[in-house]
């Protein structure tokens, strides 16, 4: 009887896992369709009346437009403005969401966020330094890299904070997650303090630039910027799914994961480097975009469960879709002006984050 009971329990567990896997695959398929729809919506919406459908149709059929000047304007808007913006939105949305899922798995806390390790604060410090000191102390950097000086400075600012954090949290070849969390908060506070000093030194024009950069936007998307940060984000995103098995095991504790054969130290190092590269490169070109990294993974856990084999790719798809939707709202809600995308994500994400907190404390049960 005991053997039959064990066999029955094992069979029920396998059936439940199979049902969750099937549901996760269905959700991922639906998210692929949703992302395609969001890409189409982003290409066809905007303050201009340029028709992306007509441009793509003329390109596919090779048709010669009747109004060459009007067609050239539409091609310029679609190819050189909207397409880079859409591609950058997909990359950044996926990077922030997957990074959030990885951080939550690493810290074993659904409220963890990439900002915990100070990458965003370090990137902001680098960008603010270029904006404020780009014509004085950092003029050689601005002259050498031109328009790429700001994203490069933001990326290396985030990378520097990450390397310093890893050096602080690692002793005798082992990295303490608790020390990493506390040191990350301290380094983020220090970076924000230095950023405040630079903001105090800024003039009126620089303050305006700083305000709009910190609120986040995809308006500066260009093909050269994508060529600069795109490979970094793509490589980081390509590496993170290989962490899924280790993150699943880490949910049982570091000791248990080690007994299961997971190289825990290498897992931590790879996760931190991947998150730093993805978030640093994203913040470098878009500025501050909040709540995507928290909301998306938690929302998907409610739908498909905590299995990182499905959670990471689903996070990439949903994060990209939500950021494109937020960008479409930012471009059209006050057209022809443009609302910073960070405001849109904060307005939508902050109430959801509060709901997560209240739900975890048992105050609400919805």
Image (cartoon, rainbow, N blue to C red):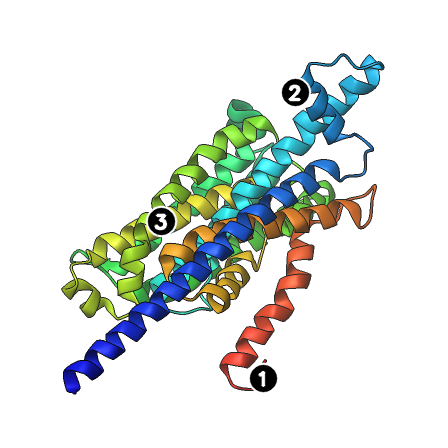
Q: Which residue is mark 1?
A: 364
Q: Residues within 10 Å of mark 2 (few under 14, many from 20)?
A: few
Marks 2/1 in contact by CB < 8 Å: the verdict is no
Side of 225 relative to 217 (left or right)? left
Q: Which residue is mark 3?
A: 241
Quadrant of the rendered image containing residue 253: bottom left
Of mark 2 and mark 1, the one earlier in the sequence is: 2
Q: How far is mark 2 from mark 1, CA to CA? A: 53 Å
Q: Is residue 315 visible?
A: no
What residue is shown at x 48% (from left), y 35% (from top)?
229
Q: Is residue 242 visible?
A: yes
Q: Residues within 10 Å of mark 1 (few under 14, many from 20)?
A: few
**Where is 58 relative to 365, above or below?**
above
Q: Which residue is mark 2?
A: 60
Pick the front one: 43 or 226: 43
Side of 99 relative to 261 (left or right)? right
């Amino acid at each position: 009887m005991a053997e039959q009971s064990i066999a029955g329990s094992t069979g029920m567990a396998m059936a439940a896992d199979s049902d969750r896997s099937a549901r996760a695959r269905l959700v991922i398929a639906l998210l692929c369709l949703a992302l395609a729809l969001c890409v189409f919506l982003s290409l066809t919406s905007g303050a201009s009346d340029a028709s992306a459908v007509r441009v793509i149709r003329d390109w596919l059929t090779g048709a010669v437009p009747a109004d060459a000047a009007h067609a050239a304007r539409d091609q310029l808007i679609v190819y050189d403005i909207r397409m880079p913006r859409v591609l950058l939105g997909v990359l950044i949305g996926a990077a922030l969401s997957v990074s959030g899922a990885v951080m939550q798995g690493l810290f074993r806390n659904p409220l963890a966020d990439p900002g915990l390790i100070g990458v965003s604060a370090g990137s902001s410090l680098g960008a603010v330094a270029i904006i404020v000191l780009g014509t004085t102390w950092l003029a050689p950097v601005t002259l050498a890299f031109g328009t790429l000086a700001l994203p490069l400075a933001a990326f290396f600012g985030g990378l520097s904070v990450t390397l310093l954090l890893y050096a602080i949290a690692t002793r005798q070849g082992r990295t303490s997650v608790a020390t990493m969390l506390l040191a990350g908060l301290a380094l983020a506070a220090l970076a924000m303090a230095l950023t405040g000093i630079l903001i105090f030194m800024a003039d009126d024009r620089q303050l305006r630039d700083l305000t709009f950069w910190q609120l986040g936007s995809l308006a500066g998307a260009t093909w050269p910027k994508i060529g600069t940060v795109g490979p970094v984000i793509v490589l980081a995103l390509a590496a993170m799914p290989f962490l899924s098995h280790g993150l699943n095991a880490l949910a049982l504790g570091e000791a248990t994961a080690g007994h299961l054969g997971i190289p825990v130290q290498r897992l931590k190092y790879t996760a931190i480097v991947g998150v730093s590269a993805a978030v640093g490169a994203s913040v470098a070109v878009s500025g501050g975009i909040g709540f995507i990294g928290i909301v998306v993974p938690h929302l998907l856990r409610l739908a498909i469960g905590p299995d990182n084999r499905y959670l990471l790719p689903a996070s990439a798809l949903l994060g990209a879709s939500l950021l494109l939707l937020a960008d479409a709202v930012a471009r059209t809600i006050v057209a022809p002006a443009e609302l910073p995308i960070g405001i849109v994500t904060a307005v939508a994400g902050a109430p959801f984050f509060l709901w997560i907190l209240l739900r975890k404390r048992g105050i609400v049960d919805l």
